[in-house]
Image (cartoon, rainbow, N blue to C red):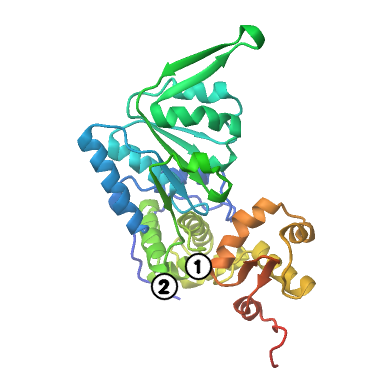
Amino acid sequence: MANPAPILMNDKKASKNKDLNVHAGPDDAALDLTLRPANWDDFVGQANIKKSLQVILRAAKQRKEAADHLLFSGPAGLGKTTLAYLTARELGSQVKVTSGPALERTGDLAAILTNLEPRDVLFIDEAHRINRMIEEVLYPAMESYKLHLVVGKGPSARALMIDLPPFTLIAATTRENLLSQPLRSRFGATFRLTYYHDHDIEKILARSAKILGTAIAAEAVSILAAAARATPRVANRLLRRARDYAEVHRQGAIDVPAAREALELLEIDARGLEPHDRRLLETIIDKFGGGPVGLNTLAAALNEDEDVIAEVYEPFLMSLGFLQRKPGGRVALAPAYEHLGKKQPGTLL
């Protein structure tokens, strides 16, 4: 079979013996940085968020002030970190990066805050995992650029107040509901990122393939986009795995058979469901009659962590209309039965 007409140039120097694995490794992390959009034009999707964000940032630049603190929420892989870097770039500022779990003591946060320069951006990932003691230090820092510390213990303890330079805090979270109300109220704007449309994912794949120097057929782009869970990060990982497969089996060009066979090898179906997704749905349907089933019961049946189910698996299944969260628990919906080829209770043969 002749190779399809490529829409991009092929890189002959790429490795031919990489292991097909949809999950990121060290090499993938480096490639993620390479593929990350460096300017607003390269950032595809989330159009309303981009427009609102650019207004906030340009107004701050005109006033020569630090921009308001920003909160980005939404499922993993949709571009929250990228938006933080683009924000710093727009402001002409440096970005300092940390995460909620890394801030174990008030001293950890104090060390970061006291090293900020005027109008720097402080990016805190997994903000919902910031402990309450750290939050208490953040409140005055965000509101009035003051750092309140207590030095020493007992009768000799002293309260210190340190002036901080004006800065912009950007927090990212996959679980906005777990943020305390006092912390949420201190952000000047909250942006909720949503899943991407297939046509946006196709644009992202085309751009990434060009950067990687990989030849890919337009039909193969559509196949990978449909299986990408409406998530740019997943799309780029699938592209890399398809590239690996094509280099080993099809002279480097990703044609339609290469895209399909790579997904089959990864056990990813045409809608992007992975084995754990199908197992979750099958457990609800086969063991619990389609639900409702409580999260803790479901986690025990799957031998899986509740947070992983709630944060990683369920949002995408809900976006497909396969799963619904009800007060009584999780319920599998008709499209899930159809996709898995199962008969829904109460339907005719």
Q: Residues within 10 Å of mark 2 (few under 14, many from 20)?
A: some
The location of residue 147, given as percent across then percent down, is 46, 21
Q: Dots 1 and 2: beta carbons under 8 Å?
A: yes
- Does 8 sit above or below residue 114? below
Q: Which residue is mark 1?
A: 259
Q: Residue furthest left?
A: 62
The location of residue 48, given as percent across then percent down, is 33, 57
x 48%, y 66%: residue: 224
x 53%, y 67%: residue: 319
The location of residue 249, given as percent across then percent down, is 53, 63
Q: Which mark is residue 219?
A: 2
On-image quarter of the C terminus: bottom right
Circle 1 sits in a helix, a strand or a loop, which is it? helix
As drawn, is 258 to the left or to the right of 62? right
The location of residue 10, given as percent across then percent down, is 38, 57
Q: Quadrant of residue 22?
A: bottom right
Q: Residue furthest bottom?
A: 349
What amino acid is at disc 1? Ala
What amino acid is at disc 2? Glu
On-image quarter of the N terminus: bottom left
- Does 6 sit above or below residue 78? below
x 53%, y 57%: residue: 241
x 62%, y 69%: residue: 323
Alpha carbons under labels 1 and 2: distance apart: 9 Å
Q: Earlier in the sequence, mark 1 or mark 2?
A: 2
Q: Is residue 44 visible?
A: no
Q: Quadrant of residue 82?
A: top left
Name the foreground residue: 7 vs 120.
Answer: 120
